[in-house]
Image (cartoon, grey):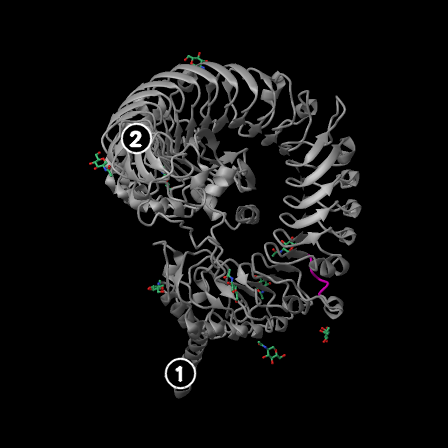
Amino acid sequence: MTLTNMVGVRCCFKLLYAIVVLILLHMNNPCIGCSERESQALLALKQGLVAHHYNDPFLYWGNQNKDCCEWDRVHCSNQTGHVVKLDLRQRSLQGKISPKLIELQHLEYLDLSGNDFNGSQIPDFIGSLSNLRYLDLSRANFLGLIPYQLGNLRNLHYLDLSYQDYLLWLPNLYAKNLYWLPNLSRLKYLDLSVVNLSDVVGWLEAVNMLPKLTNLTLQICNLPPPVISSVSLLNSSKSLVHVDLSSNNLNSSIFQWLPGTHTNLDYLDLTGNKLSGRIPESIGQMSNLVYLLLSDTKLSGRIPESIGQMSNLVYLQLSYTKLSGRIPESIGQMSNLESIDLSMNSFEGVISETHFSKLSKLRILDLSSNSLVLNFSFDWVPPFQLDEIRLGSCKMGPYFPKWLRTQKSYDWLDISDAGISDTIPTWFWDLGSKLGYKDLSRNQIRGNLRSELAYNNLNVSWNQLEGPIPSILSDVSILDLSNNKFSGSASFLCTNKTEESSLTYLDLSRNHVSGELPDCWIHFQQLQFLDLSSNSLSGKIPTTMGHLISIETLNLNNNRFVGELPSQLKNCRNLTLIDVGENKLSGLIPEWLGKNLLNLAIIILRSNQFYRNIPPQLCHLTHLQILDLSMNNISGTIPKCLNTLTTLAQNGYSRPSIEHSNYFQLGESSVSTSSYDDEASLTWKGVRSKYKSILGLVKSIDLSCNKLSGEIPTEITYLVGLVSLNLSRNRLTGQIPLRIGNLQELDSLDLSRNQINGTIPISISWINRIGYLDLSENNLSGKIPIGTQLQTFSFAYGGNPLLCGEPLPRTCSEEEKGPGQSMLVNEDDKDGLITQGFYISMGLGFAVGFWGVCGTLLLNRSCRYTYFNFLTFLNDWLYVKTEIIRQRILNK
Ligand SMILES: *[C@@H]1O[C@H](CO)[C@@H](O)[C@H](O)[C@H]1NC(C)=O
Ligand SMILES: *[C@@H]1O[C@H](CO)[C@@H](O)[C@H](O)[C@H]1NC(C)=O
Ligand SMILES: *[C@@H]1O[C@H](CO)[C@@H](O)[C@H](O)[C@H]1NC(C)=O
Ligand SMILES: *[C@@H]1O[C@H](CO)[C@@H](O)[C@H](O)[C@H]1NC(C)=O
Ligand SMILES: *[C@@H]1O[C@H](CO)[C@@H](O)[C@H](O)[C@H]1NC(C)=O
Ligand SMILES: *[C@@H]1O[C@H](CO)[C@@H](O)[C@H](O)[C@H]1NC(C)=O
Ligand SMILES: *[C@@H]1O[C@H](CO)[C@@H](O)[C@H](O)[C@H]1NC(C)=O
Ligand SMILES: *[C@@H]1O[C@H](CO)[C@@H](O)[C@H](O)[C@H]1NC(C)=O
Ligand SMILES: *[C@@H]1O[C@H](CO)[C@@H](O)[C@H](O)[C@H]1NC(C)=O
């Protein structure tokens, strides 16, 4: 080998070496693929977070692949190789964000929404990610002040910090000012819903300084009314298309900002604000508006005619306001309208075909709860096919409305209280979707039901329907046939029953159904409400009723049931109301009522033949609110443990009505909530009446007409929440407990027809609000104490020969007057003027309890079966809206 050859070979090796090195260098090129710093930053982020799914791909970050650009949900630039996008939305991760995140300096897109950052603050170092264009930290359980450092994110187009507490909507985040906001001059999308902005007076100025802003969402922010100046109007950002300021404290000044300057608006939602006065005519200038939502406000007057100019409007929601007058016919020209909701207002006048002349796209029509008359020509064929027809209380009788025959596939029909006095036409049953809901209640409708009930939900209560009840097919879910003239046996319940029934609500009360109850309740495990009261049912209560594991309300009142309460009922652990009063039941009062059914709030066994003593187990019922054991053969003494009845031992109440709710499928693709309020009939001041919307206020014990003996236990004076106490017509002896005056809420006290002796305790005169008192037919003696009202109950003291003083004719001797029987007036008379008893005795209902079956939720198909799936859609805006309105109404 020559020297030159040697040199040549060496050269070759060098060349090869160089090539290899070049290749290797290229493979490690720090400009392509993610850098060491970036992978370390991502690993630090992973360190701080716990994944809840054991096979979450997030867990494999760094395990096999060195190049972090390959990791799940990490995206790198295909030019520089830097991490530019991190999308960890809805991973159920929990923990803290590592400060090493700022090493990802090239990050443009960061989405950490739907995780749980455990109530920590939004880290201020996020403000150092200066290339960020997209930042979503919503629904992530952050708490505290929004860091002003976000103002450094000058490239941001999209910022969402909404709904940190997405279940309870507590305003966990807050801001004292928004001085940093105008720095985000490229912002197009801003959502700060459920951030407490109550102190940010200048929020509108801040928003106005964002020249590119298109979407602004500030729901439930405690927003104060903005300061409107001519300057802020001039400088107002004109780019806005979507404005949602629902559920805040805005007043009508907001109208000065919006219609004039924002003619491009597509979406305007001011639901749940303190708007008052009229809707300005200028609203018609927003001619591009597609959605207009002004529900749950105090807007009054007429709907402005200019609304007819909004030819792009698709969705008009003006429910729960104080609007009145006629509905303008110009509404019939808005040919794009798909949904009109004018319910719960004071509109009046006649609705004619003109109101709908061009509304061929209409799908949802809600005019319920107004004073409207619908007057269409006999063979009117509407231009629309509706999905929801909500016309409750709109008068359209006396004939059954024939135009309904043209509507083929609606999910919802409400023509309750419509003044219809006609036979139900046979075509009616074939219309509407199979899983829909039909409400024909409170009319004078006659006729029979068809031979089977194929519909999911049907309410025909308060009509004149008759004949036998047809068999209920398995997908029926809500059925209210109460207050009609249905007759025949109850066997329809079990006809061909082989599979699980989806029935959740069944009301057959006040009909003429007779015979024994069939024993097939094993198929009704979803039944939550069962009311068979006021029929002629007889025989024993079937033992399979113990399979009603979902049952919350069981009412068998006023029938002819015999035998004992079957012990299987102890499996119905969710029972809150059991009413088997006015039957011929006998046996012992079961101990399991108190041992097993710990949710019981109302027990009514009135007017049966139960005997022996009151089991002390009943004292375990901490939710007990009404106990009615009157008119039985109960003996023994009143248990002393009464003081453990927590609800009765507290005054005040948590809810005016006792509401139950559930979710059911409605139509093919939506879920709806249904709710009902428990009802009970009680004897109040000697009068039997029904209580429903205020049942939650009633706290009562009625043991009258039994054979109870012994003394009234002093423990009864711990039940300071009691509004009514009736122990009359027993064999009670001893004295009235001295501290009876502790029962400050008492509105009605009846101890008559016993053998109670001793004097009437002075403390009784402290009960200021007592409206009914009966102590007659006892052995009381001495002077009747003088109190605010005690002298007005002229019949309260008769049959006690040893009593004296006003209002009795017999004056007291010196001896009878006794010590201290002087006038006693309660000093703390100022507050508490309105007691529970006051409300109840006035028969005043609160403006609640009308919700009934309500609020369709247009949800995705996939979520219609289970409540769990339903929860995952909680952020659906429609749901949020329905709930907000509902909460506001309940809070009123
Ligand atoms: C980088 O990717 C984007 C989209 O992911 C693509 O539009 C673009 O053409 C790519 N650029 C190069 C240089 O490959
Ligand atoms: C969440 O915070 C609590 C204290 O506030 C702490 O005990 C808990 O360990 C934290 N959980 C996680 C996953 O960081
Ligand atoms: C907003 O930008 C200005 C510069 O234009 C800067 O001085 C200020 O610190 C920024 N404010 C915030 C809160 O980032
Ligand atoms: C919002 O903040 C204000 C004052 O900063 C406070 O008074 C108010 O209670 C907060 N609202 C809620 C709902 O937390
Ligand atoms: C109005 O906007 C312009 C440009 O954004 C700005 O220079 C000016 O200071 C603003 N005026 C007021 C009174 O905010
Ligand atoms: C912004 O608003 C428009 C108009 O209402 C809407 O179509 C769009 O989906 C909104 N953008 C986002 C990101 O929500
Ligand atoms: C009930 O079953 C009988 C025979 O099994 C059948 O003839 C009848 O059609 C069924 N009725 C209903 C309503 O399914
Ligand atoms: C009983 O009530 C609880 C609480 O409301 C509920 O979670 C549970 O599912 C109910 N049980 C049944 C069998 O319906
Ligand atoms: C009340 O009657 C009981 C017997 O039932 C008797 O022991 C007691 O002395 C009587 N008290 C008065 C004050 O008459």
Q: Which residue is drawn at 75% across and 32% down?
A: 350
Residue 122 in picture, x, y percent from top left? 47, 68
Question: Would you call the spot at circle 1 few (<14 residues within 10 Å), some (14-19), or many (20 or more)?
Answer: few
Name which quarter of the figure residue 857 lies in: top right
Quadrant showing the N terminus: bottom left
Q: Which of marks 2 and 1 is in front?
A: 2
Q: Residue at x 52, y 28 (%)?
A: 457
Residue 771 makes an appearance in the image = no
Question: Would you call the spot at circle 2 few (<14 residues within 10 Å), some (14-19), or many (20 or more)?
Answer: many
| Residue carrying label 2 | 754
Distance from the alpha carbon under mark 2 to that under mark 1: 125 Å
Residue 889 makes an appearance in the image = yes
Name which quarter of the figure residue 11 lies in: bottom left
Magenta segment boundaries in residue numbering? 237-241
Classify 464 as above or below 730: above
| Residue carrying label 1 | 10
Q: In this view, does 527 lie to the left or right of 398?
A: left
Front-most of 234 and 499?
234
Q: What residue type is labelled 1?
A: Arg
Residue 633 in picture, x, y percent from top left? 28, 24
Classify 485 as above or below 202: above
